[in-house]
């Protein structure tokens, strides 16, 4: 199950809650909902996100909790207003270097993934108040970059 293409017609939509819908795919049309501030895709079956999600310049909260994501879009750093990102309980092995460009980010949750490293660029997140990386199955390698010591 995916989203209908007509979603791009919702020009004034600010909040979209799609949790617990067995969604397996988000089409590129999501990148055209330009006023979106909150996008909740938690408890679905997503394996990937379209790169167009990085076009959501007003996005402040992105909830990807409990999916099957193996990676986040490489251009996620373009989400200049993003304050909270929850990517916990997925299958992520790394986080994109561009995350260091998320200057408004104050909360990053990536609990219970398969992370083997975190980008050094996270040190640039001057507004970051919460960083949750616990329960990673590859924990012994996660902290080897010098940002966090284990």
Image (cartoon, rainbow, N blue to C red):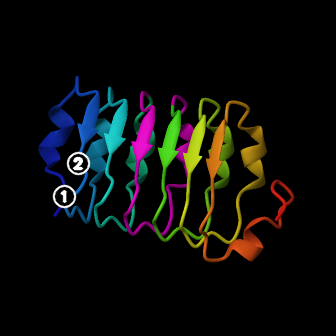
User: Circle 2 sits on which residue?
Assistant: 18
Residue 144 in the image: x percent, y percent?
A: 83, 67
- Of residues 110 and 8, the one drawn nearer to the viewer in this rendering: 110
Is 65 located above or below residue 6 in the figure?
A: below
Residue 106 in the image: x percent, y percent?
A: 60, 34
Q: Tell me the magenta residue range.
A: 58-81
Residue 35 in the image: x percent, y percent?
A: 32, 26
Q: At 18% across and 31% down in the image, what residue appears?
A: 10
In the picture, the quarter occupied by the C terminus is bottom right
Q: Quadrant of residue 32?
A: top left
Verify CB contact (< 8 Å) between mark 2 and mark 1.
yes
State left or right for residue 102 relative to residue 119.
left
Magenta residue check for 67: yes
> What count of labels does the image hold?
2
Q: At 73% across and 68% down in the image, what residue appears?
A: 142
State left or right for residue 90 relative to residue 41.
right
In the picture, the quarter occupied by the N terminus is bottom left
Q: What predominant SS class does the magenta segment belong to?
A: loop
């Amino acid at each position: 199950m995916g989203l209908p293409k007509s979603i791009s017609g919702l020009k004034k939509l600010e909040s979209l809650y799609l949790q617990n819908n067995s969604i397996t795919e988000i089409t590129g049309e999501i990148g055209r909902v330009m006023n979106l501030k909150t996008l909740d895709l938690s408890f679905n079956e997503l394996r990937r996100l379209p790169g167009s999600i990085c076009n959501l310049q007003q996005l402040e909260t992105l909830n990807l909790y409990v999916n099957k994501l193996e990676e986040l879009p490489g251009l996620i750093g373009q989400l200049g207003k993003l304050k909270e990102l929850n990517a916990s309980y997925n299958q992520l092995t790394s986080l994109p270097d561009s995350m260091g460009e998320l200057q408004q980010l104050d909360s990053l949750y990536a609990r219970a993934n398969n992370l083997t490293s975190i980008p050094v660029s996270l040190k640039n997140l001057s507004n970051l108040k919460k960083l949750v990386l616990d329960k990673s199955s590859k924990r012994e390698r996660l902290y080897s970059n010098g940002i966090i010591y284990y």
